[in-house]
Image (tube, rainbow, N blue to C red):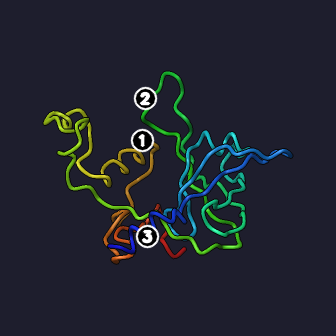
């Protein structure tokens, strides 16, 4: 488990997203979910200049010695910011795929939470009746299903190794090695 803590502390999975304008400015962050894909917010890629799926954004990895790279916003992960009258917990997600110049990314080490009992905000027995998920995996699928994504045939997170206890296995046809 010391390897997981080290990967997390290095934050090699953390990326900064820059605007596509002539005078580039920092607009947000993303995190690597596998070696070729990053997850961020829809409003971040929109502000960066990618207003439709297929748009490109430039990002870098500030806590590593990696140079900046271009990523394409995938239609599969395009989930716009909720409109004023929509449920505010739905949407605002974007999935990015690294175009080329593949850096050696260390994905964010995701883990399943077995219980929220120790967290005051979720300790209420009625929390599951109010829609609070039991696990991080449930919370992730709650967010993804809000965007109309279908559950992949395999679980999205599964135990892999001590270094990466939970890694992405499927994202609507994409695998960690694609």
Q: Badge 1: few (under 14), some or many (20 or more) residues near its Cα, within 10 Å?
A: some
Q: Which residue sits furthest top?
A: 85
| Quadrant assignment for the N terminus | bottom left
Q: Position of residue 24 (x, y in %)?
A: 79, 47
Q: Position of residue 161 (x, y in %)?
A: 34, 78
- Residue drawn where x is 46% and y is 69% of the image: 7
Label 3: which residue? Answer: 6
Say if mark 1 contacts mark 3, CB within 8 Å. no
In this rendering, would 122 be left or right of 67? left
Mark sitting earlier along the chain (1/3)? 3
Mark sitting earlier along the chain (2/3)? 3
- The vertical placement of 123 against 111, above or below, is above
- Residue drawn where x is 84% and y is 44% of the image: 23
- The vertical placement of 167 against 96, above or below, is below
- Residue drawn where x is 22% and y is 46% of the image: 116
Q: Position of residue 157 (x, y in %)?
A: 35, 64
Q: Secondary structure at mark 3?
A: helix
């Amino acid at each position: 488990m010391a390897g997981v803590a080290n990967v997390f502390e290095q934050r090699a999975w953390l990326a900064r997203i820059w605007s596509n304008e002539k005078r580039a400015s920092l607009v947000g962050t993303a995190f690597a979910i596998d070696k070729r894909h990053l997850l961020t917010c829809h409003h971040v890629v929109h502000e960066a200049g990618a207003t439709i799926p297929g748009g490109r954004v430039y990002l870098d990895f500030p806590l590593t010695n990696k140079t900046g790279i271009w990523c394409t916003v995938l239609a599969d992960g395009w989930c716009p910011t909720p409109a004023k009258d929509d449920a505010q917990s739905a949407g605002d997600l974007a999935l990015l795929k690294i175009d080329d110049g593949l850096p050696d990314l260390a994905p964010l080490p995701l883990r399943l939470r077995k219980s929220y009992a120790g967290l005051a905000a979720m300790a209420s027995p009625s929390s599951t009746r109010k829609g609070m998920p039991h696990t991080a995996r449930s919370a992730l699928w709650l967010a993804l299903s809000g965007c109309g994504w279908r559950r992949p045939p395999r679980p999205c997170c599964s135990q892999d190794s001590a270094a990466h206890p939970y890694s992405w296995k499927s994202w609507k046809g994409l695998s960690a090695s694609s």
